[in-house]
Amino acid sequence: MRSRVRSLWRALTGRTPVEREMDAEFRLHMELRAEDLMRAGLAAVDAKRQARLEFGIPERYKHEARRARGLLPFDALGVSWLDFKLGGRMLVRYPGLTVVGGLAAAFAIAVGAGVFEFATQTMSPALPFPEPDRLVAVRLWDPARLREERRVTGELAVWRSLRTVRDLGAFRATERNLTGAGVATGEPVVVAELDASAFRVARAAPALGRLLVDADAATGAAPVAVISHELWRARFAADPRVVGRAVRLGERPVTVVGVTAPGFGFPLYHDVCVPFPSGPPVDATSPGPEILRIFGRLAPGATLEAARAELAAATARAAAELPPSHARMRPRVDTFADAVSQPLMTGDPRAVIGLQLFLVALVVLVFGNVALLVFARAATRESELVARSALGATRARIVTQLFAEALVLGGLGAAGGLAVAAAVVRWTFREMQSQGTRLPFWMHESLAPRTMLWAAALTLLGAAVSGVLPGLKITRGLQARLRQAAAGAGGVRLGGVWTAVIVAQVALTVAFPVTAFFARRDAQQLRTFDPGLPTRQYLVARLEMEQETASGTRGDTSTDALVRRARAAAVALEQQAESQPGVVGVSFASVLPAMDHPQRRIEIEGLARQDSANAPRVSSVDAAPDWFAVTGAPALAGRLLAAGDVGTRAVVVNAAFVRHVLRGGPAVGQRVRYLDPDDEDAPRPVGWQASPWYEIVGVVPDLGMSDGSDPNETGAGIYRPAAPGPSTYLAVRVAGDPRAFATRLRELAAGVDPTLRLYDVKSLDQVPAAGQRATTFLYQALAVVSALALLLSLTGIYTVMALTVARRTREIGVRVALGSDRRRVVAAIFRRPLTQVGAGVLAGALIVALLVRGVLGRLTAVEVAFVAVYAALMMGVCLLACVVPTRRALGVEPTVALRAE
Amino acid sequence: MSDHSGLLPGTLDLLILKAVSLGKLHGYGVLLRIEQISGGALQIQQGALYPALYRLEHQGLIDSEWGTSDNNRRAKFYQLTATGRRRLGEETASWNRLADAIARSLATTPQEL
C-alpha cells in the first residue's frame, strides 16, 4: 500500500520529472542496444535505426506506464502540478483577492472545524482505547419517563451473570476532602467508587504501583485507593514514593497503592478510585444508591445484538426478584460511546447530521462570496481564457485550472482557519476547566484527525464552489465569444444569483457590527459594574457539607442531622477564622455580591395585587445576621438584622428595592411575601400560593444584588436572616491580600471537620471575572466576524463595480466622446449596483430592528441614534466602494476606451 | 497488456522478478538477462519491458534507484524487495504446478484413460 501511495504521489507531484526519467531510461536502452548491434557488425546509422525499431513506440509505452501507476483518471481531468504552481503565482499577482479570499476561507474553515470538533466530542466521542466499539454500557431505561433510571438494585447481579458481556462493572462518584501527610491542600477531589474490572475493560496500565484488583473489594480487605496522574502531580508534587502512603478521604483512611496513566478517567472522570462496595444490595426492593455508569466489554465473538437478546432473556427470568417499581423498566445494552453521548443529544442522531448540513451551508455561503471575486478575476482574464480555448484547451481543462487555483487559495485559508479553530477549542477547554467544569476523560483540547479530514473535505467543497462555479459560468459560450472577440462585443455579465449574494452580503455587513456593539456594551457594563463594597478585601468560598458522617459509616443521614452538623462546623470555622491575625470579619450568605442572583416574584401587602406575570421580581439572599456588620453597610432606615432575627420573619431590603418596588415610599413596617417557592426546581406543594408574610425592618445600601449582565434586572433585593446551611457561601474580610489567607482557611476548615468541603476559594473581585471573560470573548469574536463581513462585502461591491466599468469602458468612452452628460452616463451604469447596495442596507436595517426588539431589550435614545447613524454610515461606506471605479470610468479617454477590448 | 510475442500472459512479470532476483539490473540489463537465462528462447518486445517494470515497482515488488552503469552512464537500477522475493517464490511454485499439470496432461496416452 505504502509503495503504491508513494509511487502515485511521485507521479502526481513530479509528472515532468517522471516523464524525463522515462525518456532517459528509454534512450539509454536504445543506445546500449545500438552499441551491441554495432559490436555485432552493423553500421552506426543502421544499428540506431534497428534499435529504435526493436524498442517500439516510446509514447505507447509511456502511456502504458502511466496506466500501470494508476494515473490515467488524473490525465482525464488534466490536473497537473503546473496548475497548482499557477495558482500560487495568482496569489502573489492578485494580493487583494488573496487576502480577502484567504480570510474568508479561514473564517469558514475555522467555524466549520471548531464546531465540528465540539459536536463530535460531545455527540460521538472517540474513546482512546483498543477496540472501543466492543466497550458497552448497560442502562436501565424508564420508557414512561423517557430517561435512564440510575437507582439500579437487583439488576446488577443479573447483569453480572451475562455471558455475552465480560467484566461488567459499576461506577459512581462522590466528592471528598483529601488530607494526610504530604498532601497539598486544595479543592475537594472526585472519588470514583469503581469495580476493578474498569481497568481491564479499558485495558489500562498503571503509571506507578498497581491498579485496583477484585480482591480489594472483598469484605475485610484493607482500604486502598488509586490516584489519577493529574492529582499525583497537583497534590503530591509527582512524588514517586506516594505508593504506600496513608491518606484520608473525608474521614476515611485509605492507602495509596498506585497512580493511573496520564489522561485516564474511565468511565467519566475522577481523581481517586476506590473499590466499588461489594456485598449484596441492602434490600432488593428499595432503591439503591445512584450508579452513574455500568460498563463491560463484549465477550470474544459476541455481538451487540447477542448481548441485547441475552439481557432481555435474563431480565425476563429474574423478573420476580426485582422491585415491582422496576417491572416496566427496560434494560439496554449500547456501545459505550452511544451511551455517554445519548443524554446530550436526547437520542436523536439527526442532530449531528443537521449540524453538518449547517456547516456545509455556511461554507458554501462564504465561499460563494469568494466565488464572486474569483469570477470577477476570471472575467478580467477572459481574453486569456478565450485564447487558450482557441489553442485547443477544453472547457473541462479551463475549469480544472480555476479549481486548482481556488484550491490553492482555499488551502492557504484553511490552514489558517484550522490554527484559529485549534486555538479557540483550546481556550474554551481551559476556560471551562478554570471555572471548575470537569470534562469527561475522552474530551481533549486538540483537534482530532477526523476534524482535519472534515476541514479538508470542506476546503475541497469550498474550492469547488469558488473555482468550478465561476469556471463554468465564464466558459459558457466561450466558443461564441471567440468568434465575437474581434468585434469587441459581448462580455460576461453578473446574473441574479450574484445579485442575491451581494444583497445578503451587504445586509450581514450592516447587521453584524451592531450585534458586536451590543455585546461590547454588555462586556463594558460587566467591567464597570460596581457591587458597592470593596471586593478586593474579601476571600470567598463555597462550603459544602458531606452527607456521610465520620469514618464513612452512615449514621444519622437525615437532613436535620446534616443541617445541625453544617451549622456547628460553620460556627466553629467562623470563630477560628476571626481569631486569625488580619481577619476583620467572617460571614455567610446564600449568594455572593456580583454573582448571578436568582429572581423571585413578590407581593407587597396593601398594594393592589398584580397579575403574576407583572409581579415585581427581586433577588433574595439568605444572609447571616452579621453580614452587614462584616461588609460595613450602614442601615439607611430602620435597623440591621440581629442575631435574634434568625427564625423570625424580619427582613431588610436594599435601596434599589425602595426605588423600584416601593417607588421611593416608606419601607420599614411594610410586609412582603414571595409568590415563588424557595426551591425553584422542587415541585410546588399542592395549594401553595405564596410564602408567609415577612416584615421589612430596615433598608441597606445596594450590595451587588445582580451581576450587571442583564439590563432588565433592577438589582432590588431582600435579605432574610439565616444560619449557614449545608451548602452556603463564606466571605472572609481580610486586611491585605485576601488570597494569601486561602491556604490558612483550608487548614482551618480541615481542622474543624474533615467532611466540610471548600470550593472556588478566591477573592471576591474574581467572582464576576469568569462571566466577563466569556462576554468579552463573545464581543471580540463578533468584532472579528463583523470586520470580515465588512471586508468581504466592500471587496464584493468594489469588484462588481470595477467589473461593470471594465465591461463597459468602450461604451462609456463612446458616450462621453459623443458629448453625453457625465451624470447620466454614471447613472445608467451604476443603477443596478446601487440598487443592490440599497436593498442590502435596507435588509440589514430590518435585521437590526428585529434584533433590537427581540433580543437586546431596552435601548437608550443615544443607542437608537447610534444605530441610525451607523446604518447611514454603512450606506456611505458601501457607496465609497463605488467611487474609485466610477472615477476611473469617467477619466477614460475616448481614444483609449475605443481600443479597450 | 502489450503483446510480448512468445510469452504467456503474466509470465513477463515472473521473468522480470527472476531476472532482478539474480542481481541489480537496469532495464536493458533485465532484457539481456532474460534472454540469457532462457537460452535465447524467449523474445520480448523491448519497450514492453518498461510498463511491466513500473507496474511491479508500483506494486512494491521491486525497487529502483539511479546509479552508474558499467560503461559509466546514468541508469536506473532495479532490485527485488522482500515482498517481491516472497511473490517470486509463490509464483514459481504455482508456475511449476501448472507446468507439471500441463505436461502430465499432454503426456497422457489413450491407454492410460
Image (spheres, grey):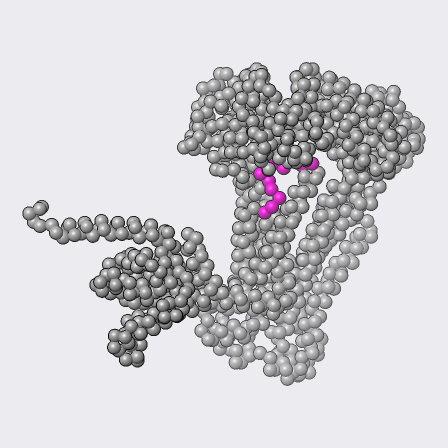
Compared to A852, does A201 lie above or below?
A: above
The percent position of residue A435, horizontal first and vertical second, equals 71, 38
Quarter holding the C terminus of chain A is bottom right
Q: Which is more toward the observer, A66 or A605?
A: A66
The percent position of residue A617, horizontal first and vertical second, equals 79, 34
What is the count of numbered marks?
0
Q: Dividing the picture into quarters, in which one does residue A443 lie?
A: top right
In this picture, residue A144 sits left or right of residue B78: right
In this picture, residue A353 sits left or right of residue A557: left
Magenta span: predominant SS is: loop
Identify the residue at image location x=58%, y=19%: A221
The percent position of residue B89, horizontal first and vertical second, equals 30, 50
Q: Which is more toward the observer, A891 or A707?
A: A707
Compared to B110, does A499 lie above or below?
A: below
Q: Dividing the picture into quarters, in which one does residue A51 lie?
A: bottom left
Span highlighted in magenta in the image: A436-447
Q: Dividing the picture into quarters, in which one does residue A772 lie?
A: top right
Q: Which is more toward the observer, A330 or A688?
A: A330
Identify the residue at image location x=64%, y=84%: A895
Identify the residue at image location x=46%, y=31%: A298
* Whether residue A710 can be seen here: no
The percent position of residue A277, horizontal first and vertical second, equals 58, 21
Identify the residue at image location x=71%, y=48%: A778
Whether residue A309 is in magenta: the answer is no
* Whether residue A457 can be seen here: yes
